[in-house]
Image (cartoon, grey):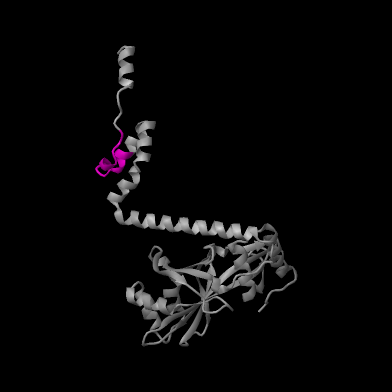
Amino acid sequence: MDRSTRHRQSEAPRIPLRPELVEFMDVRSLCQYQCCSKACGKDVREANAWSILAGVQAPRSVKQALESDALSRVRSQTRRRLLADALAKPSQPFRPSQFRDFTFFVRIADRGDRGRVIWEGDLQTASNDCIDLSLTNVTADIKRSGACPKLIDYLAQTATDGDADMDVLGWFEITLIAIRDVDQAMVSIGQFEYNCHHDGEGDPDQRFYFSCHGMEALFGVPGFNFRSELYLKTWHDNDGGVLDQLALGVLVWEGEMETGNLLGNLDNSQIQYLLTYLAGVPRQSVRDEALRTIESWVADSDIDSE
């Protein structure tokens, strides 16, 4: 092939990828087309080919993805504006959010069934004094869905014992995440597994202790760690019991949690303060002030030892 022939071929008009043809392609062929050349890759981007193909092959999931993307963009813009507003104001003292300013995402899963989700959803505390999440409606959802028959049978037993507790709750894994409503800032409180019966064994109302998986710390300052814990309250009734309530506590350990000393618990106002700090504070000076306050709790032994 001489130079003139090659020159004529290079000047030959190129037919771009037509969007209406994309729906007849499959993933592999579109990928091969995109990788052919820089020009083909540009065609794929300009035709929005991947979105078109995904819309044909999985229209429902694409619609949900687009809605989710739009929602995340709105939330992102909201957070930016809130941050800009906060930075524009004169420096103010650290003011903790209230418990009611948070939504709590809860997931209950069965570790014995490859982590199958029994229930998940958003809950809010009824009080600003503590994090006590009502599970009454959760129980109704589980009964209606039939997601965990062994739990429903267990709650219907008025005379339970340690073996029954372990057979059902021993396989539970509870995940708790706090989301601050104003800016959607999230705090991963932990993933919890059954530890032991706490009180009320054999009574209609009982409480069970769930410890954080792997002894993971919620937060730490030099020499000390804060570890979250959950208390699950149940009501047993042969006419149909319920998961009643989920309560959050935070333990304070000196040194490493595996080998250190348990000092006590944070009170509810301190938990509220800590959650606000972990959710994020815009100004560095205010953040530093809040951290000094948290460090002072352990330095001044301002911890409930009961």
User: Does the magenta-highlighted stretch encompass residue 125?
Assistant: no
Residue 168: x %, y % from top left: 42, 74
Q: Quick one: which residue is furthest to the left in this view? A: 24
Q: Nearer the viewer, residue 239 or 88?
A: 88
Q: Which of 37 and 220 is in front in this view?
A: 37
For the record, the magenta segment spans 16-30
Residue 121: x %, y % from top left: 43, 69
Q: Which residue is drawn at 58% across and 69% down?
A: 228
Q: Which residue is drawn at 67% across and 61% down?
A: 287
Where, quadrant-wise, is the C terminus in this rendering?
Answer: bottom right
Which quarter of the picture shows residue 265? bottom right
Judge whether 145 appears above or below 37 on screen: below
Q: Tell me: 294 left or right of 178.
A: right
User: Does the magenta-highlighted stretch encompass residue 21?
Assistant: yes
Which quarter of the picture shows residue 32? top left
Q: Tell me: 246 left or right of 280.
A: left
Judge whether 11 appears above or below 44 on screen: above
- Residue 266 makes an appearance in the image: no
Residue 105: x %, y % from top left: 47, 68
Q: Tell me: 63 left or right of 94.
A: left
- Residue 228 makes an appearance in the image: yes
The number of numbered badges drawn on the structure is 0
Q: Quick one: which residue is furthest to the right in this view? A: 300
Where, quadrant-wise, is the N terminus in this rendering?
Answer: top left
Residue 87: x %, y % from top left: 64, 58
Q: Nearer the viewer, residue 222 or 79?
A: 79
Q: Which residue is drawn at 29% across and 41% down?
A: 19
